[in-house]
Amino acid sequence: MKFGPKLFLVLTGLILTLVVLSSVVGGLVLQRAYRVVSEDAVGSASQVILSTIADRDKRVRLLLRPLTNDARVKGGLATRAGLADPERLGGNTPEERRQNADDYFGSFMDEYWVDDPEGGPEQDLVLLVGSDGTLAYGEAGDTRRVDLENEVMEHLQVSTLLGAISTGDESARMLWSGPRLRSDAPIVPALESGLYFAAGSRVVFHSSGVGGDEVVGAAVVATHRLGLERVVSTGAEAVFTDRGAAIDSTFRLADAGTQTAASLEQAAARWLADNPSSDAGLTEVWLGGEPYYGKVLPVGGMVKGPVKAGVFYSRAREFETVSTARYELAGIGAFVALLAIAIATALSRSLSRPINEISEAAGKVAGGDLKVLVRADRKDELGDLARRFNQMVQGLRERALAKDALGRYLSPEMAHDVVSGEQGISMQGQRRELTVLFCDVAGFTTISEKLEPEQLVALLNQYLDAMVKVLIRHGAYVDKFEGDAIMAFWNAPRHAVDHAVHACQAILEMRAAAKKLSVEWKAAGQPEFGVRYGLNTGVAIVGNMGATDKINYTAIGDNVNLASRLEGANKQYGTELMISEETFANAAEHIEARELDMLQVKGKLRPVRVYELLALKGQLTPEQSKIRDGFAAGLKLYRARQFLEAKALFELATTDGPSRTFAARCARFLEQPPGPDWDGTYEMQTK
């Protein structure tokens, strides 16, 4: 079997094994991880609350049973309390008689008070209330209340409880928010704020024979919080609300009085207010910006009151469980992956060695090493691949040598196009808008006369190398060198957007590089030098030109000649960077420049407006700005034939070449004024 099918079968079998194994293990882990633990926690918390309510109900019945069944209560309690005839209690004033009645009730009720096994009072409040709402007796915890106000029936919750008893039920029970019996009258201040279980049963004070039995509700309120500490152990949270406001919750146990507990309680209260009690499943809800599952707790057998209960489970706990499972799965996956890698390495080492050699060699070729070769002694497809790889590298080496040689005589762009065949060698030119540059070293002839030929060539190559690097970096095509002169242009052979802007940026950088090089030459004992630059933008003819056996990619036309003339015109104005009006118009938003003159160069009949390039936009120095503004004002006076005033302005800038040039012109015109047809144009007599 050949290498290809063999490697395919081995890798396919390994991959299928990994996929099946990962799927089985991952399925088992995720099945355990995504078990709905929230339903178990909510169910457990609900059971804690409901069982606590059932326990409270059982304890309350222990108190209510003797009150409702004891014969002494029926007919005897009223007599002892004096309800049938309050005057029998004795006492000179109503206050004394009420105190006496309270004492009688206290001695009687002590027999029925249910104590907590741990020593504390299990019930927090006992009330005996007449059917008309009159409070006959009340006791809160260990605090004796003598002067309880007769306002029990005005409280909605107690009224609801007693109303259920008086309508025919033997007993009734409900959840109650204490300690206030009504919103503005705290009649039992010994109670704490929180949640209570309240129950009431019929009590017959006496049978008078007139009007039948008098029914009264004995309301008993058990210890509050209803075992919330036990709810916490289930992992869930419980919140109780009274008329839309949170009155108690497990959040208070962990963060009592904190902003977090208050925020969670308020969010839970709003959700409970909008959702009725239901046996449906869990609902997703956000509390305080955190995800929870929520459920309104259905408490059966209760008189409907304003208290509602809700149970919640933080989904963050589920996320933690899932995260743990993911880590476990990742560990198992890593183990399987390592095992698979070990097996694959052992099986494929002998098969993959030739591929690795070719891959490593290809990396070296990509890095520019074209001398690399690989072994090609195999007789299968890998041997054929190795031999063809070596042939490819040999071809690339020959091509690179040709491209390097061409690039030194042409341009890198032209060399690439010729070698790659992307652009055929055509002898037809085309019209295209170009930005053309001519630059020349000022006084190069004088410099060359002072140097030996070898020294001159070395310095010239150093200068040209610095200039060409800047040009190539800014996308220029370097056309030719003529001694120290350079011709280059933009937007050919490849199109360039904003080519005038790139050209201006290039000559500003070239000037800086040339000045740095001149300083270095001077420090080394070599002659200083300066460079003049001319830029023009316009349509020219560009293409391959020359003989059949010798061609050159270049540009010709009036606009090319104008760039050359502008380079030479710098001598007339004492400037270095002269650009035409067309170049300025195309790059004005990116450069700082000043208008120099209306110039008619030699060989052209129509004058052109020329500018001096000063800096990139926003980089003009205060001194340059001052000189530019003063020159502009003087130029305006000059063109208005106010030569004396213009001369005075120009002479203020003693270090500025153009200002000195125009000051001299003004002096000549003051001696010999120009003719009436003079329009401010200056005609150059030399190139």
Image (spheres, grey):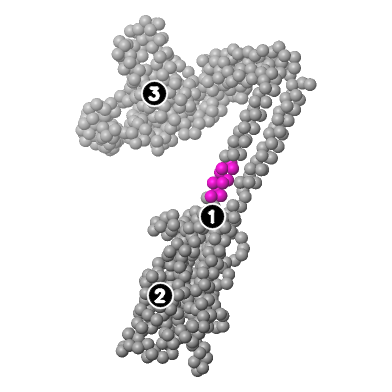
The secondary element bearing badge 1 is classed as loop
Residue 481 in which image quadrant: top left
The secondary element bearing badge 3 is classed as helix
Residue 442 position within the rendered picture, expressed as x and y whole percent measured from the top left: 34, 18
**Quadrant in which the N terminus is drawn:** top right
Between marks 3 and 2, how big is the CA–CA gap? 102 Å
The secondary element bearing badge 2 is classed as strand
Q: Which residue is mark 2?
A: 139
Left or right of 416, for residue 81: left
Q: Which residue is mark 1?
A: 234
Q: Residue at x 43, y 90 (%)?
A: 84
Mark toward the viewer: 1 or 3: 1
Earlier in the chain: of badge 3 and badge 2, it is: 2
Nearer-the-camera pick, 330 or 469: 330
Residue 457 position within the rendered picture, expressed as x and y whole percent measured from the top left: 41, 9
Magenta region: 317-326
Mark toward the viewer: 1 or 2: 2
Which secondary structure dominates the residues rendered in magenta? helix
